[in-house]
């Protein structure tokens, strides 16, 4: 069974509190999301294997750790997942980026796929699916389904705020996937929005409402 990692850190908590405030404007909201994503990246990558390589320092030759693989694919679920990409790329500039476009149907709350574009050979890489919100879990489950159908089997999911229902849905459908979140909130309202949450992440990132 994949693990649930709740990444708690005072800086992440304080930044997330600013993001929850309905009066925090889009430019600040985007900056905070980028910063939290970078901070979360530190934990998400903690188990990446290293091996020793030879390096000549100005003083002597030695053996030092380097990443064993450098093929990582960050997969934002459009649109809101885009807000997490820059922070992770700052940490891992060598990572590739693939995109999955999903939108929740406002009546059924079910996700519909409208875009899928991945880097070549991505099936063999470590894949980090990123989306700030894990509400019913429908979008994340669908995105991971899509990736697995195309042969991916090393997937982790990264969310900023998750509802227990979304976590349960992902764990039931994809028990092999580790989930990384900054906060687990109380639940969902009648529109399947996370409570207390931070509202519509896509709209707040892109200023569309
Ligand atoms: C939001 C969010 C997730 C999804 C979460 O996207 O970014 O992708 O809803 O909800 P779920 O867990 O119930 O599926 P939305 O469909 O609003 O699209 P957007 O990112 O383009 O705004
Ligand atoms: N999508 C969002 O952007 N926010 C929520 O609370 C739920 C789904």
Image (cartoon, rainbow, N blue to C red):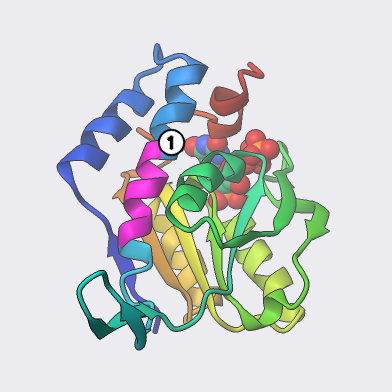
Among the 4 quarters of the image, the one containing residue 137: bottom right
What segment carries the magenta color? 35-42
> The N terminus appears in which quarter of the rendering?
bottom left
Which quarter of the figure has residue 186? top left
At a point 69% along the width and 44% down the height, the residue shown is 104
Asked if the residue at label 1 sits under 8 Å from ligand 1, the reply is: no
Q: Main secondary structure of the magenta part?
A: helix
149 lies above or below 179: below
Verify whether residue 36 appears in magenta.
Answer: yes
Residue 127, picture quadrant: bottom right
Residue under label 1 = 33
Image location (x, y in percent) of residue 60: 22, 80
Is residue 26 positioned above or below 34 on the image? above
Regarding residue 172, the answer to whether it shows in the image is: yes
The single residue placed furthest to the left in the displayed view is: 10
Residue 202 is a magenta residue = no
Q: Is residue 171 left or right of residue 64?
A: right
* Residue drawn at 26 percent across, 41 percent down: 12
Q: Element type at marker 1?
A: helix
| Residue 172 coordinates in the image, percent (x, y) | 49, 75
Tell me residue 140's x, y (percent): 59, 59
């Amino acid at each position: 069974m994949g693990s649930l990692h709740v990444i708690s850190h005072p800086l992440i908590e304080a930044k997330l509190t600013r993001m929850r405030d309905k009066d925090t404007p889009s430019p600040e909201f985007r900056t905070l999301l980028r910063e939290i994503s970078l901070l979360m990246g530190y934990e998400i990558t903690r188990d990446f294997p290293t091996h020793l390589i030879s390096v000549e320092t100005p003083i002597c030759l030695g053996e030092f750790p380097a990443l064993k693989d450098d093929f990582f694919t960050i997969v934002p679920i459009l649109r809101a997942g885009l807000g997490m990409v820059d922070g992770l790329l700052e940490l891992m500039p060598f990572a590739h980026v693939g995109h999955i476009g999903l939108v929740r149907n406002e009546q059924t709350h079910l996700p519909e796929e409208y875009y899928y574009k991945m880097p070549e050979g991505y099936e063999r890489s470590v894949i980090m699916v990123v989306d700030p919100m894990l509400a019913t879990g429908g979008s994340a489950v669908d995105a991971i389904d899509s990736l697995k159908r195309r042969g991916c089997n090393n997937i982790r999911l990264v969310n900023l705020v998750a509802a227990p229902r979304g976590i349960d849905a992902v764990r039931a459908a994809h028990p092999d996937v580790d989930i990384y979140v900054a906060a687990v909130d109380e639940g969902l309202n009648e529109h399947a929005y996370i409570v207390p949450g931070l509202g519509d992440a896509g709209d707040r990132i892109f200023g569309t409402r």
